Image (cartoon, rainbow, N blue to C red):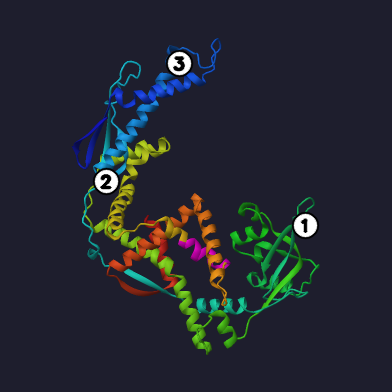
Amino acid sequence: MNVTKTSLGNLTEEICVEIVAADYISEVETELKKYRKEAKIPGFRPGQVPMGLIKKMYEKPIKANALDKKINEGLNSFIDNEKLKILGEPLPIEGKNDDQSFETKTDFKFYFEVGLQPDIELNLDKIKPKYYVIEPDDDMVKRYVDDITRRFGKYESPEAIGETDVAFGEMQICDENGNIKEGEDKIKTSFAVDKVALATIKKKIIGTKIGESVTFNVHKAFKDEADRASMLRMDTAKANEINDVVFTPNSISRVTPAEMNEELFEKAFPKQDIKTEEAFINRAKEDLTKSYSKEADRYFANEVTKDLIKTMNIDLPDEFLKKWLVANAKNEDEKANVAADYEKYKDSIKWQVVEGKIHEKYNLTIDAEMIKDYYKTSLLANYFPVPETETEDEKKEREEQMNKIADNLLKNQEQTKQVYDYLYEDKLISTLKENIKYKEEKITFEKFKAMVLNQEKEK
């Protein structure tokens, strides 16, 4: 086999894969012998079918498969050996590969077009992005603190519904006359009383005892379509058709919030030595701010992506890429829209080039050991807590169990791919933050949310 390349200009090259009979004939003959041995043809004993008949029936597809295999091997090896950084995949050149008669020819030449990545210089100093630190407002901090006090509060099961309770029970749909519809299944559901929008309905629900029933208009009680549909266990369209319902509670959950004292502070933030309510609220605010860091990181990465694409002079093999996109389109509509949508594709491909350079320079490799370590530290650690009095033998047994489970998790390709993507994104963002000079700016959550929505519209 002989593989050569010729420059076509504009980051595009032609690769010729030349295959002669000696490259594939032994594989074809081996496969034909296998077919002869296994063929079941009326009039012939197994293994005694004339080879001429076997060739007539099977040689052409076997030869085609062998050539296809050799073409792929030749292309991939050549690209690897020549260290060609290609975009997309090699495309057969129309008009050059048409005269390939497998019945009469033994030697072949197959021609492919490839698009090459441009050689760019990565300069992260050219951009000066901002990193937004999201500061929760007082209402958000209060809600978070309230959530903590409820999480560590006292749980009760009262006989009658109170204004901050969660009611569990069955809901029945009424007809236009306010009577329960016959033949309708009872809906097992629950709702938080403080989420009821209309004060008169809330007042009506409060005081309802277990086993008693209360009728109310579900549209007026719960304004949000998605929440209402979820509560009714049906899609939004069907939920919008329902007005009055009868709700009968069968259990009630009440949480009395924990008192603001050192016992709560220690439960919520162990070993933080928090003594005062002010210090507790500040620690909660810090925790809440940290929880927004992932969103801030993603916004930062998206802005850096746009800035690098704009500031770096990145040429692409445009005509090749358009042909490649057409070849890989799922349907005729996609093919027709390639030319119109190419600018959107172009920015994505440019980022692939830049990201590849970042990966190469800063070694963003994520290997199996990293994924396994993530499984052990982030997923399994809670199931295998370290006892204070753990012996060396117990430690060894615990680690062996964790390793065994982590190895099994690695076999789940879909889940492992998700972990790989998460770790890679995390490493990429960390690398960008470490190597780009950015200015921090504090911003409210509402302003940040508006910026994210605007960023999504621009995509």
Left or right: 43 in relation to 207 = left
Amino acid of disc 1: Asn
For the residues labelled 3 and 1, the Cα–Cα distance comes to 80 Å
Q: Earlier in the sequence, mark 2 or mark 1?
A: 2
The structure residue drawn at horizontal position 54% and vertical position 76%, both measured from the top left corner, is 144
Label 3 Cα crowd, 10 Å radius (few <14 / some 14-19 / many 20+): some
Find disc 3 in the rendering and name its residue: 54
Can you tell which mark lies on residue 177? 1
Left or right: 240 in relation to 212 = left
The span shown in magenta is 373-383
Amino acid of disc 3: Ile
The structure residue drawn at horizontal position 51% and vertical position 51%, both measured from the top left corner, is 412
Find numbered disc 3 in the image and state the secondary structure of the residue it sits on.
helix
Relative to 47, does residue 414 appear above or below in the rendering? below
Label 2 Cα crowd, 10 Å radius (few <14 / some 14-19 / many 20+): some
Amino acid of disc 2: Lys
Image quadrant holding the C terminus, namely: bottom left
The mark lying in front, picked from 2 and 3, is 3
Label 1 Cα crowd, 10 Å radius (few <14 / some 14-19 / many 20+): few
Find disc 2 in the rendering and name its residue: 85
